[in-house]
Amino acid sequence: MEKGIKIPDWLKSAGAPCSCCAIGRGKGFIEKNIEAIASFIKEVLLPEGFANKNGLLQAIDPRAKLLGVILLVIAAAMLKNIPALAGFVALAAVLAAFSKITASALLKRVWPVLFFTFVLVLPTAFNFITAGDPVTITSFSVNHHDLYISRQGLEGITVLLLRVAAMVSLVSLFMLTTNYPDVFRALQSFPIPKIFVAALSMTFRYIMVLIKIAEEGHLARKARTIKPSTVRESRGWLANRIWLIMERSLEMAEDVYLAMTARGFSGEVKTMTAFEMKGRDYAWIGFAIFVFLLSVQL
C-alpha cells in the first residue's frame, strides 16, 4: 500500500477559479464609495496626533488660540490686497512649520475647499461677467460678441482664492493643534449657547461611530458573498443600509441622551485638561489684534 496521500492532478494545476464562485475583479462601486467617503472624512476630521506634539500653537491655551484665529480669519476676510493675502498664506505656512504640522496634512484640508472655490468662480474670469482688459492674445467670438479672459476677472479670482486659502489654513491649524474635547470646551468661553456646543460635540463624535457601522456592515456582507450581486440587489442593499444607519442614529441619539441625563449632564462640556492663561497666550492675542488692526488700515 502506497504511503501518504495522493493529490489529484486537477488539484495540482493552477487553473483559474470557478466562475460561479468568483466575487469579481477589484472593488465594486459601493465599496469604493464607502472607502472614499470614510477616508476623506477621517482625513479631514481626525487630527492625526499633531495636537500632542510640542509645537508653537500646541502650547497656547485653546481659548486664546481660538480668539486669535477668529481675529486673523476676520482680518483675512476684509483684505482685498493680493500681496497682503499672500502674506497671510505665508504666515499660515510659518505657523504650521513651527507647530510641526506637515505640509501634506495641511494640504489635505485646504485643497478640496480651494478646488471647489476655483470651479465656482472660474466663469468670472471671462469678460461676459467681469468686463475689463483682455489678457489673452486671441479671443473667441460667440454670437458676434468677443469672449476673452479679463485682467480684472483674474485679479478677482486670485484675491478670492488667496483669501479662502488663508482662512481655511488658519482654521485647519487650529483644529490640528487642538484636541477636539478642548475645542468644544473653548467654544463655551464665547457667547454661544451651551446646547449648541454640546450638540456639535455629539455630532462630531458619532459621525465616526456611524461611519464605522457602515464599514463593518459592508465588510460583513462581503465576507458572506459567494457570487457577485446584480445591480438591483446592490441598490436594494445600499438603500437598506442607509435606512438602517438612519434608524441606528436616532436610537443612539435617544439612548445617549438618556444615559447622559441619568449621569447628571447639564449641557456643559468638561475635559481633563486644566485651562490656564499664561504670558505666551496674551502675546498670541496681542499679535492677532495687531494683525487685525493692520489689515483694517490696508
Image (cartoon, helix red, strand yellow):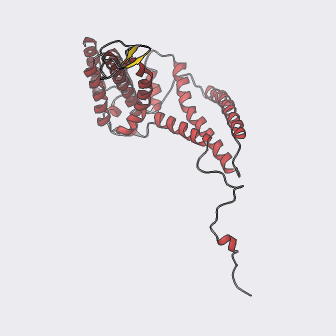
* Residue 241, horizontal then vertical, whole percent: 68, 36
Relative to residue 240, is residue 74 depicted above or below?
above
Q: Residue at x 61, y 28 (%)?
A: 260
List the single residue furthest toward the right. 1
276 or 160: nearer the viewer: 160
- Residue 126, located in which quarter of the rendered image? top left
Q: Where 188 sits versus 8, above or below?
A: above
The residue positioned 29% from the left and 23% from the top of the image is: 137
Between residue 268 and residue 164, name the one nearer to us.
Answer: 164
Q: Is residue 4 left or right of residue 65?
A: right
Q: Choose top left, top right, bottom left or bottom right for residue 38.
A: top right
Quadrant in which the N terminus appears: bottom right
- Quadrant in the rendering for residue 290: top left
Indicate the quadrant containing the C terminus: top left, top right, bottom left or bottom right: top left
In percent of width and height, residue 139 lies at 35, 20
Give the residue at x 64% y 62%: 16
Q: Is residue 128 in view?
A: no
How many marks do you count on the picture?
A: 0
Compare residues 140 and 280 and report the one nearer the observer: 140
Q: Position of residue 64 (x, y in %)?
A: 35, 23
Q: On the picture, is 199 further left or further right than 145?
A: right
Q: Position of residue 281 (x, y in %)?
A: 31, 26
Name the residue furthest bottom.
1
Residue sticking out furthest to the front = 144
Left or right of 262? Residue 273 is: left
For the residue pair 118 and 183, the one nearer the viewer reads as 118
Residue 192 appearing in the image: yes
